[in-house]
Amino acid sequence: MTHKAGYVNIIGRPNVGKSTLMNQLVGEKISIITSKAQTTRHRILGIVNGDDFQIVFSDTPGIIKDPAYKMHEVMNQFVNVALIDADLILFVVDITDKKIEEKTVERLKNIEIPVFVLINKIDLSTQEQVEQAVETWRETLPNVTVFPLSAQYNANVEFIFKQILEKMPECPPYFPKDAISPRTNSPTAPCVSSSPKSSARKS
């Protein structure tokens, strides 16, 4: 039986629902969920294991357009690393937020790693608005795959998880199969992949 394993990094502006999404995907309360923006200060990893797969999720700090102080700069550095140290990028956007993070969008246009744009909080919009948002993002980033969802209500999350699994490369597990979070475990050496990931994984 073949085994799949890979790293999935979640990026996006503060408060778009990245932590809520990761908790739905992982099934454990690992990330911090709050209405106060910029709560996540560092990469928090969660693992989903199956008999023939292991997916390691990273919830990065929110992208800050104009860093006001050193902590903001450090948080943005985590996001920069997330754009190269992954097998798949989940770019989460809020359907109620009309602002587009232009610098991130430009980087995603040329990235070699597969990217999913996840339009979150569709429960706060109409079907027409959802369809329009999907079309807008498909035009903005033709090289990515776009999915609408509501992380809070777990809508479309299971389908997206299956699509994530499809993108994972064949690889042995990085961490013990009974691990939920790898903070206390050391990963094995990464698999060789065509994606331009870093040469070593850090937990």
Image (tube, helix red, strand yellow):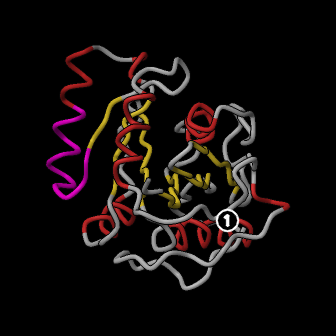
Question: Residue 150: percent from the left, percent from the top?
Answer: 45, 24
- Circle 1 sits on which residue? 72
In depth, the one of 98 and 47 nearer the eye is: 47
Residue at 62%, 68% in the rendered image: 78
Q: Residue furthest right?
A: 184
Other-residue count near label 1 (Cα within 10 Å), few / some / many at <14 / 14–19 / ≥20: some
- Quarter of the image for residue 152 reads top right
Residue 65 appears left or right of 176: left
Magenta span main SS = helix
Quadrant position of the C terminus in the picture:
bottom right
Segment colored magenta: 133-145
Residue 179 appears left or right of 96: right
Residue 60 appears left or right of 120: right
Residue at 66%, 65% in the rendered image: 75
**Residue 144 falls inside the magenta stretch:** yes
Asked which secondary structure carries label 1, the reply is: helix
Question: Residue 3: percent from the left, percent from the top?
Answer: 47, 56
Which residue type carries mark 1? His
Question: Residue 163: percent from the left, percent from the top?
Answer: 34, 42
Residue 181 appears left or right of 133: right
Question: Residue 179: percent from the left, percent from the top?
Answer: 75, 50
In depth, the one of 145 and 138 nearer the eye is: 145
